[in-house]
Amino acid sequence: MSSSELQRVWVEDTAAVLTRELPWQKLSGLTIAVTGAGGFLGGYLVRVLLGLHGAGLVECPVRVLALVRDVERGRERLGVFADSPNLELRTWNLNDIAVPDLGNCHYVLHAASQASPRFYGTDPVGTLMPNAVGTASLLQALQRCPDPRGLLFVSSSEVYGQVGGDRTLAETDYGHIDPASVRACYAESKRLGETLCVAWYQQYGLPTYIVRPFHTYGPGLLADDGRVFADFTYNVIRGENIVMMSDGSARRAFCYASDAIAGFFTVLLSGQPATPYNVANPAGELSVMELAELLVSLYPDKGLQVERRLPPEDRNYLSSTFSRLIPDVQRLSGLGWSARVTPQQGFRRMIEAHTT
């Protein structure tokens, strides 16, 4: 996982986030807990925080408390960044009904979540607990700290439910979710996580910040992630034809990791508390078929093709029923954020980071 090429791209992506004109000095010398620190998005958050001082953006280094289920795996996933003297890796399982002792922590960035539909059927409890009970425990833990500054909750576009039509989704658009379906374990727990954040701010005055990423991709996604953009990318990495198990008409907005992480920090440092923000790249809209064709076209010398097959019956992979899932990002754009990486650039970076 921690190849030199992957490390190089992570360093470049971190530097790209740090070029954003944000009030980074707010974080100087603070202690910040990151959940899911060994995961895809959590790892990016850790790397950016650890890079602030070296980039001259904070006067004093940020101390990062990385909460992971497996310290050794977390260390491996963070690669060279795990050697930072300002990083502490600590075992914590957000499936447990317990409140962690965060010591003198100032912020919590809560990115721990099983986002792939391949988990919804096999581990619905492990999918919902970190978003619901885990969020409540982190809010309570932060509230007990001497000088709490705020919690960032990484929610999801899944909170919108079944919204009719093909319109872009603003933060106030919502549709139906059947709470008695197994697939609701993800969407409903994300909804509850957001409500907990709003309630805590209303009742206790603890600032909470809510981001709703859409289809975020980049180096660090695992080969067995299960989502179509990861599957297709690893097909290309392995030199395999892309296998299309649908008509490919579903449309999604693909956002590269460095743009998404920049959006997260924009909300944390400049956003309104208890207010959700879509974090996505509407200009990255592609159908699933267009994505497959794009990935194949990036490397014509490989001679890869897109194949169509009937999907195997998989009762555990509970896919989305959205035909088009495209965000309205005016709320985030109003804070000065914009996406900078095109799908062509981003997917090439992801593929080359994992190609040895």
Image (spheres, helix red, strand yellow):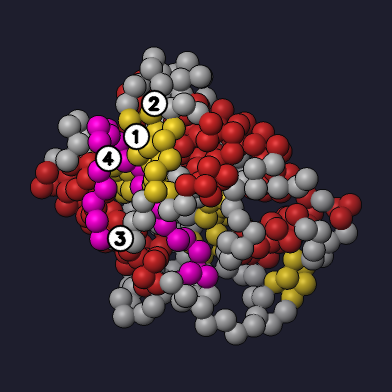
Q: Secondary structure at mark 1?
A: strand
Q: Amino acid at mark 3?
A: Asp
Considering the image in quadrants, where does the C terminus appear?
A: top right
Q: Quadrant of residue 330?
A: top left
Query: Going 60% across and 85% down the picture, which residue do you hit?
Result: 313
Residue 321 lies within the magenta run = no
Identify the mark at residue 102; answer none if there is no mark.
Answer: 4
Do labels 2 and 4 touch, CB within 8 Å? Answer: no
Which residue is the site of mark 1?
Answer: 32
Measure the alpha-carbon separation of dots 2 and 1: 7 Å
From which residue to which does the magenta span run? 96-120
Label at residue 96: 3
Q: Is residue 10 left or right of residue 193?
A: right
92 left or right of 323?
left
Disc 2 target residue: 62
CA–CA distance in space, label 2 to label 4: 15 Å
Main SS of the magenta part reads loop
Q: Which residue appears at 25% of the width and 60% of the height?
A: 97
Q: Measuring from the top left, give residue 119's x and y in whole percent.
A: 48, 69
Disc 2 to disc 3, C-alpha distance: 28 Å
